[in-house]
Image (tube, rainbow, N blue to C red):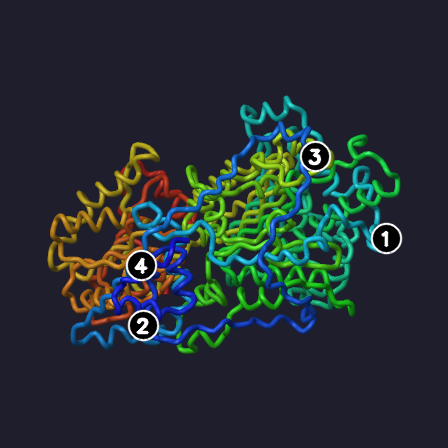
């Protein structure tokens, strides 16, 4: 981090810095500027809060406060030649320029008091929202890294105290927990997957082989698309009944899972029905080690149900992988064999991390760790050892009192923004038999839990001095949960992560090459990596990641259900919906075609003063900037609100729009996602592009009834769309109506009245 700055700062700036809370100062250190959505209300420093776990999870070991120490690594000189030498740079980073905080207070006009009642109610929640309001991005609005941005969060804690206790190299498998370690000859899906041998010609043919697909309909998941670029495509249907023993769960999961999942089971928990119908079908796909894309995971429905089942799969995978390593350690010690003499001992990757779980907020990471503890402990009288649990609860938990009870938001908003919603974090978890180590160093961890921003700041970019992505080299299980939220943060971080997955490491990190699997050494790890992708919607960008980066040898499974009704049926106001179609030449020209169509065909109809109170809903921030600059150039009477607008600016814009002093209001989708304010005074509504979330369409349309002054007959709603908006259009109007609209070759004007 750069130094705080020269001592010659003015007294006003010093007082301002002293008044910042801990979270503000952390954001200032990370990004070099005050968060644009922070509302300065309370001068008190926020005290760290602790979220209590259930009583069964109370036991934990003492917390380590020591600084992280470098690990002792053994280097095999005879194989180091195969790795790329990386020179260590000891030069210190240059001092970064300090950002000067200029807080300007804006006075509201008379009559603003009625429009800012909602903000006054939400004042205390701003501290919770300040990290989420700005899309997670270490770069500024112009795409460049702002001054003062650090590649790593300050004072990042790692547990160096329990290194030997959780080391796979120096521990052995306990007899009572060993079970059958001859995984190579077993019917265990894990063993079949990791021991599957690919040939060079199969790998070379992947790029040219056409993707084979087959569709099946399952009872709960619905329409599934099985696909693969390898071998003959294999599909299967779920059995009516499954037993835990047939799933090859590692001990103690057979007993602990039933209790952990009991909250979702309708009847008494038992081994014959340990899953809900949805969980059963999802776990069958997960346990087959196929890639999975499930786009119907919402915060209100199915979210926790799905989190439970993928945590079961994660723990099952890690326990089996570690048991194999520990069992081979015991065999080597008892037989005193040279490790290099038998390929049966190849049981690990180039680095230890096996699982990466990407979640958007700290609250989600907390719940994942709680499930890990519950799955390993269950109702056993003997508590498991959890290192640094108290510290973890303090940093990832939250106090319910921080959220004011009078804050009224939609149910889905409450479900998404619950608990600690800081979006910049990363932590390692090591699991060894009946012990869990939180804050483990990355290269001593089995599981990594992080946000896209937390990974982006450690992966770094080209030309940066300090960057590290070797820990991603041997990831065998990648879980991206709540992928739709990353569209509202910064999707570039997800793409940056995927581009650095399963690359050959630049350093050895103390690996024993005689224990590394051959497909890891051959740089074929990406063909063995299972990717589980969960989101709340079908989106082209999410589909692209699944189709491009998921090349698992076992194949891929995508849920492809189509919406039959559409969210337009949830519009409560009697409103004519005019869908105007544009005809771009190709996908690359859609952005320019939409802008030209809007400027030449749509905007002239609304320039007249009679068409006042026009709200323009813009999903993309880049389109918003382009429209804002055009409106300024044309000197149109407008105001604007985006995710970077200060609270005072938001209040003034809403007031001017309500009073009719501004004819147009430009509103970004991300502002609506993070704030959900009701914009009053709308008479004419223009969707510059169909919303990313379908239910936002009905939400924005229903804002018209916030102020009814007898102008209902003059209300209008115009939507721009093209043939490339098929998914979003189907989600809004339904698949049948969307098909009719897309089949038309000309611009179509459809008048649709929302149903009450």
Find residue 596 and report its image quarter.
Answer: top left
- Disc 1 and disc 4: Cα gap in Å? 62 Å
Read off the residue under disc 2.
Answer: 119
181 left or right of 431 in image: right
- Disc 3 and disc 4: Cα gap in Å? 50 Å
Q: Secondary structure at mark 4?
A: loop
Dot 4 crowding, Cα within 10 Å, few <14, some 14–19, many 20+ = few
Question: Of marks 2 and 1, which one's residue comes earlier in the chain?
Answer: 2
Q: From the image, state whether disc 3 or disc 1 is nearer to you.
A: 3
Q: Secondary structure at mark 1?
A: helix
Read off the residue under disc 3.
Answer: 513
Q: From the image, state whether disc 1 or disc 4 is nearer to you.
A: 4
Q: Secondary structure at mark 2?
A: helix
Dot 1 crowding, Cα within 10 Å, few <14, some 14–19, many 20+ = few
Q: Secondary structure at mark 3?
A: helix
- Disc 3 and disc 1: Cα gap in Å? 27 Å
Question: Of marks 2 and 4, which one's residue comes earlier in the chain?
Answer: 4
Looking at the picture, tell me which residue is in the foreground, 730 or 335.
335
Read off the residue under disc 1.
Answer: 175
Single out the residue that lies furthest toward the right. 335
């Amino acid at each position: 981090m750069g130094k705080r700055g020269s001592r010659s700062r003015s007294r006003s700036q010093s007082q301002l810095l002293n008044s910042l809370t801990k979270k503000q100062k952390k954001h200032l250190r990370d990004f070099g500027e005050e968060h644009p959505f922070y509302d300065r209300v309370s001068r008190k420093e926020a005290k760290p809060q602790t979220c209590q776990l259930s009583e069964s999870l109370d036991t934990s070991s003492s917390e380590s406060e020591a600084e992280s120490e470098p690990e002792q690594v053994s280097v095999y000189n005879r194989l180091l030649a195969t790795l790329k030498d990386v020179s260590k740079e000891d030069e210190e980073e240059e001092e970064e320029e300090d950002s000067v905080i200029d807080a300007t207070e804006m006075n509201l006009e008379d009559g603003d008091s009625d429009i800012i009642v909602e903000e006054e109610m939400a004042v205390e929640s701003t501290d919770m929202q300040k990290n989420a309001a700005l899309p997670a991005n270490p770069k500024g609005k112009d795409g460049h890294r702002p001054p003062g941005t650090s590649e790593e969060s300050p004072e990042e804690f790692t547990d160096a105290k329990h290194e030997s206790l959780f080391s796979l190299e120096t521990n052995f498998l306990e007899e009572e927990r060993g079970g059958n370690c001859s995984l190579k000859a077993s019917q265990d899906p894990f063993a079949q997957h990791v021991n599957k041998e690919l040939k060079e010609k199969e790998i070379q043919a992947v790029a040219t082989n056409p993707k084979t697909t087959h569709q099946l309909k399952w009872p709960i998941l619905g329409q599934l698309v099985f696909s693969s670029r390898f071998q003959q495509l294999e599909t299967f249907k779920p059995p009516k009944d499954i037993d835990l023993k047939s799933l090859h769960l590692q001990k103690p999961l057979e007993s602990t899972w039933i209790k952990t999942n009991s909250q979702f089971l309708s009847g008494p928990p038992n081994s014959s029905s340990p899953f809900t119908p949805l969980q059963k079908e999802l776990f069958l796909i997960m346990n087959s080690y196929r890639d999975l894309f499930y786009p119907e995971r919402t915060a209100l429905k199915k979210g926790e149900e799905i989190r439970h089942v993928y945590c079961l799969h994660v723990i099952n995978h890690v326990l089996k992988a570690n048991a194999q390593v520990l069992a081979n350690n015991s065999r080597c010690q008892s037989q005193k064999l040279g490790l290099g003499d038998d390929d049966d001992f190849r049981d690990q990757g180039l680095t230890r991390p096996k699982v990466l779980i990407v979640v958007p907020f700290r609250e989600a990471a907390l719940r994942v760790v709680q499930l890990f503890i519950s799955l390993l402990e269950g109702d056993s009288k003997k508590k498991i050892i959890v290192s640094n649990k108290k510290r973890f609860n303090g940093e990832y938990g939250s106090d319910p009192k921080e959220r004011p009870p009078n804050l009224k938001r939609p149910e889905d908003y409450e479900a998404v923004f619950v608990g600690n919603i800081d979006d910049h974090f990363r932590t390692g978890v090591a699991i060894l038999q009946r012990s869990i180590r939180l804050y483990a160093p990355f290269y001593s961890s089995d599981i990594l839990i992080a946000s896209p921003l937390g990974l982006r700041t450690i992966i770094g970019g080209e030309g940066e001095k300090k960057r590290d992505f070797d820990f991603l080299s041997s990831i065998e299980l990648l879980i991206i949960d709540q992928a739709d939220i990353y569209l509202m943060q910064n999707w570039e971080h997800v793409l940056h992560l995927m581009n650095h997955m399963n690359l050959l490491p630049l350093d050895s990190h103390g690996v024993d090459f005689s224990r590394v699997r051959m497909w890891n050494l051959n740089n074929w790890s990406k063909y063995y990596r299972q990717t589980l992708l969960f989101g709340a919607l079908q989106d082209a960008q999410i589909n692209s990641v699944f189709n491009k980066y998921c090349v698992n040898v076992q194949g891929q499974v995508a849920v492809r259900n189509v919406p039959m009704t559409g969210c337009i049926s949830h519009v409560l106001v009697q409103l004519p919906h005019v869908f105007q179609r544009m005809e771009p030449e190709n996908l690359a020209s859609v952005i320019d075609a939409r802008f030209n169509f809007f400027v030449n065909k749509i905007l002239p109809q609304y320039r007249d003063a009679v068409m006042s109170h026009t709200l323009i809903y813009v999903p993309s921030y880049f389109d918003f900037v382009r429209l804002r600059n055009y409106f300024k150039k044309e000197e149109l009477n407008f105001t604007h609100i985006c995710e970077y607008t200060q609270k005072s600016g938001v209040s003034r814009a809403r007031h001017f729009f309500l009073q009719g002093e501004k004819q147009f209001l430009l509103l970004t989708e991300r502002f609506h996602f993070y704030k959900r304010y009701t914009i009053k005074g709308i008479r004419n509504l223009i969707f510059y592009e169909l919303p990313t979330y379908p239910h936002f369409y009905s939400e924005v349309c229903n804002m018209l009834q916030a102020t009814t002054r007898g102008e209902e007959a003059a209300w209008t709603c115009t939507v721009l769309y093209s043939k490339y908006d098929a998914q979003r259009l189907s989600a809004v109007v339904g698949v049948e109506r969307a098909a009719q609209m897309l089949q038309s070759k000309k611009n179509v004007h459809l008048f649709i009245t929302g149903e009450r």
